[in-house]
Image (cartoon, rainbow, N blue to C red):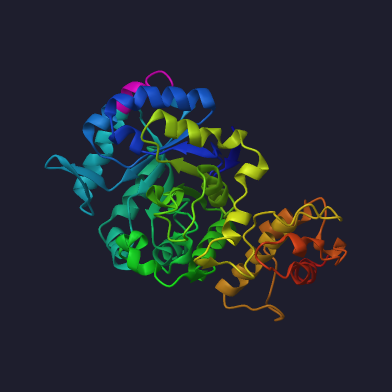
């Protein structure tokens, strides 16, 4: 298993996590799935469901091994009239959280995830109704260790993250959704009508969100990496072609700030397939050639951090250099500062990350070999010149 730092939380999480579907589809699966996770080194799981039976079954499965898992559990997900609801009623939210602690058999949650906010007006309601203050209180009391938010809308996520309280963002990340502009209606993400006519490149707000999270040290946990299974099926995929689970996971993990992908496994075979990602070859994980061949999508000129341009004769990690350069530009542009102006600066984090690379943009031979390998026609040599100008070497 591979592990990554979850933003600035100090938590080291497995790149494959266990999604909630494993528990809500069949409560009796809880122990079986946690056993598989523990054996494979999976140490992170998501629990959005307020179903009392699911929580109790998971609590029983956790007995004696609570410290082996990092729990991401959702706040504002409540059980009413025998079914799940999202609530913004503070009394209901409090009661549901206390019920979750009791049923899980724990006195703390690692990441308390404010549940499902896709509209700016809803984010304002969350604040106005005291829910943000409540999760801050829970953190101060040690009942949650870190504050999270789950969302499908980059506009809302950017606003919430920018305000500074969110430490972990659960976000829907896959190449299909990454092409769509933000919307307050989550159903738009899987409506056939929005994909008519084809697409070109990533939505800039989604790119900005990932870069903002990286810049602010907000870790991203991924949901819907397979788009509900649609992008695993050529007939269902809006791109007109399918990807493998390993390619979907690899794409999600290549986005800035992403630490782990929550596998929405509904059975043991699906979970085993996600866990097997870490044993796959680089060739099996690579999504570059598949993306370049999509009949309905063009990524021309957009660096996908796929590393298909490697190896470099000067041994430059081209993808990382480009990523750090883009993060610097995004940081400045978010503050209304543009390249070439006196106020433009390199943030400490990106400067240090760039410094410790074994080789830097200034070592580029300008041979162009990388560009012959790039499936997306990126002007890599120009990017290296620009990175050298920004970082100074």
136 in relation to 267, above or below: below
Where in the figure is residue 114, as x and y percent of width and height?
35, 50
Q: Nearer the viewer, residue 42 or 335?
A: 42
Indicate the quadrant containing the N terminus: top left, top right, bottom left or bottom right.
Answer: top right
- In the image, residue 163 lies at what x, y percent? 45, 63
As drawn, the residue found furthest toward the bottom would be 341
Task: Give the answer, above or below, for where 219 lies relative to 161.
Answer: above
Residue at (37%, 31%) from the top-left corner?
267
Q: Residue, x 52% and y 64% (percent of image)? A: 295
Q: Residue furthest top?
A: 64
Give the image location of residue 170, x and y in percent.
43, 50
Q: From the viewer's perspective, tell me whether residue 172 is left or right of residue 320.
A: left
What residue range appears in magenta? 57-65
Looking at the image, can residue 163 be seen?
no
- Residue found 43% across the figure and 30% down from its top: 269
Number of numbered discs: 0
Residue 35 vs 300, above or below: the answer is above
Is residue 180 depicted above or below 342 in this figure? above
Q: Residue 61: within the magenta?
A: yes
Q: Note whether residue 162 is visible.
A: yes
Query: Which residue is more in the foreground, 326 or 296?
Result: 296
Relative depth, front residue between 331 and 84: 84
Name the outermost residue toward the left. 81
Q: Residue at the location (44% across, 60% down)?
A: 177
Front residue (pair 191, 103): 191
Report the predominant secondary structure element of the magenta stretch: helix
């Amino acid at each position: 298993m591979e592990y990554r730092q979850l933003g600035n939380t100090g938590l080291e999480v497995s790149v494959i996590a266990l999604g909630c579907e494993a528990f809500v589809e069949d409560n009796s699966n809880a122990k079986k799935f946690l056993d598989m996770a523990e054996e494979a080194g999976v140490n992170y799981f998501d629990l959005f469901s307020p179903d009392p039976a699911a929580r109790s079954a998971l609590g029983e499965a956790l007995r004696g091994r609570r410290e082996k898992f990092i729990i991401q559990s959702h706040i504002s997900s409540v059980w009413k009239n025998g079914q799940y609801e999202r609530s913004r009623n503070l009394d209901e939210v409090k009661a549901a959280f206390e019920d979750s602690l009791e049923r899980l058999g724990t006195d703390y949650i690692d990441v308390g995830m404010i549940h499902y906010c896709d509209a700016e007006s809803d984010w304002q309601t969350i604040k106005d109704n005291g829910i943000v203050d409540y999760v801050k209180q829970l953190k101060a009391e040690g009942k949650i260790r870190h504050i999270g938010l789950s969302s499908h809308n980059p506009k809302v996520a950017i606003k919430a993250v920018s305000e500074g309280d969110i430490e972990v963002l659960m976000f829907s990340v896959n190449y299909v959704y990454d092409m769509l502009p933000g919307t307050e209606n989550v159903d738009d993400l899987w409506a056939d009508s929005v994909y008519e006519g084809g697409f070109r490149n990533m939505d800039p707000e989604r790119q900005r969100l990932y870069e903002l999270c990286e810049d602010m040290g907000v870790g991203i946990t991924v949901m819907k990496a397979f788009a509900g299974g649609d992008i695993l099926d050529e007939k269902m995929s809006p791109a007109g072609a399918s990807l493998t689970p390993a390619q979907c996971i690899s794409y999600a993990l290549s986005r800035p700030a992403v630490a782990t992908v929550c596998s929405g496994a509904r059975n043991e075979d699906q979970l085993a397939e996600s866990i097997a990602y870490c044993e796959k070859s680089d060739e099996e994980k690579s999504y570059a050639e598949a993306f370049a061949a999509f009949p309905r999508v063009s990524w021309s000129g957009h660096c996908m951090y796929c590393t298909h341009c490697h190896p470099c004769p000067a041994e430059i990690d081209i993808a990382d250099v480009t990523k750090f350069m883009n993060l610097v530009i995004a940081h400045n542009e978010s503050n209304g500062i543009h390249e070439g102006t006196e106020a433009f600066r390199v943030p400490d984090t990106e400067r240090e990350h760039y410094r410790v690379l074994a080789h830097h943009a200034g070592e580029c031979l300008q041979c162009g070999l990388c560009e012959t390998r790039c499936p997306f026609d990126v002007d890599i040599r120009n990017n290296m010149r620009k990175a050298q100008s920004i970082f100074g070497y």
